[in-house]
């Protein structure tokens, strides 16, 4: 059987009242040669513009998995998410959430008038299958 979509995906509402997820500054600097900046003051907050909820795995449905999933991702200058890493996972759902995040789109983060790539913590609240 196909995994069920996570119908109870909600967010904490940081910066927007309608998004199913929200982000917060990562608090660490990760500047690299690819110019990925740490999210900081003076940058516009990204807004979620397109999301597909994660699909619950069979094991997660059987265990009635709920809770807050945290992933640190790079939001690119085009608004896509790349290099997502689990910061705080949920049983049987890590790969399903990471797969869903790969399809999500945000408005680009603007800093000093230009879009920049930033490290950003994405929060996904799963309310059960």
Image (cartoon, rainbow, N blue to C red):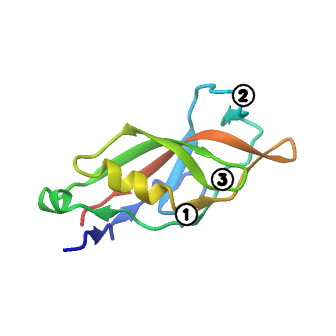
Query: Tag 2 or tag 1, which sits nearer the N-term?
Result: 1
Tag 2 and tag 3, C-beta contact below 8 Å: no
Q: Residue at x 70, y 42 (%)?
A: 117
Image depth: mark 1 or mark 3 in front: 3
Question: Which one is nearer the viewer's eye here, 125 or 109?
Answer: 109
Q: Between marks 1 and 2, how big is the CA–CA gap?
A: 35 Å
Give the Cα distance between marks 2 and 3: 22 Å
Q: Position of residue 87 (x, y in %)?
A: 40, 36
For residue 90, side relative to residue 52 (left or right):
left
Q: Which residue shows up at 23% across the image and 50% down it?
A: 92
The residue that mark 3 highlights is: 46
Residue 40 is at least partly visible in this image: no
Decide which of tag 1 and tag 3 comes sooner along the chain.
1
Q: Is residue 91 left or right of residue 43?
A: left
Q: Secondary structure at mark 1?
A: loop
**Residue at the farthest bottom position:** 1
The residue lying furthest to the left in this view is 62
Q: Which mark is residue 33?
A: 2
Image quarter of the N terminus: bottom left
Task: Categorize mark 3 by other alpha carbons within 10 Å: few (<14), some (14-19), many (20+).
Answer: many
Indicate whether 119 appears above or below 114. above
Residue 98: percent from left, percent from top: 41, 51
The quadrant the C terminus occupies is bottom left
Mark 3 and mark 1 in contact (Cβ < 8 Å)?
no
Depth order, front residue of 25/92: 92
Compare marks 2 and 3 and give the one earlier in the sequence. 2
> Local crowd at mark 1 within 10 Å, few (<14), some, or many (≥20)?
few
Q: What residue is disc 1 on?
A: 17
């Amino acid at each position: 059987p196909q995994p069920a979509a996570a119908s109870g995906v909600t967010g904490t509402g940081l910066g927007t009242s309608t998004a199913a997820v929200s982000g917060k500054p990562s608090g660490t600097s990760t500047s690299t040669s690819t110019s990925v900046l740490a999210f900081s003051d003076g940058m516009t907050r990204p807004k979620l513009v397109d999301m597909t909820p994660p699909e619950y795995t069979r094991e997660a449905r059987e265990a009635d998995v709920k809770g807050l999933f945290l992933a640190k991702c790079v939001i690119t200058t085009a608004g896509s998410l790349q290099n997502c890493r689990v910061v705080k996972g949920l049983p049987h759902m890590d790969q399903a959430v990471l797969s869903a995040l790969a399809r999500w789109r945000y408005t680009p983060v603007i800093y000093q008038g230009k879009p920049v790539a930033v490290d950003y913590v994405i929060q996904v609240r799963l309310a059960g299958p």
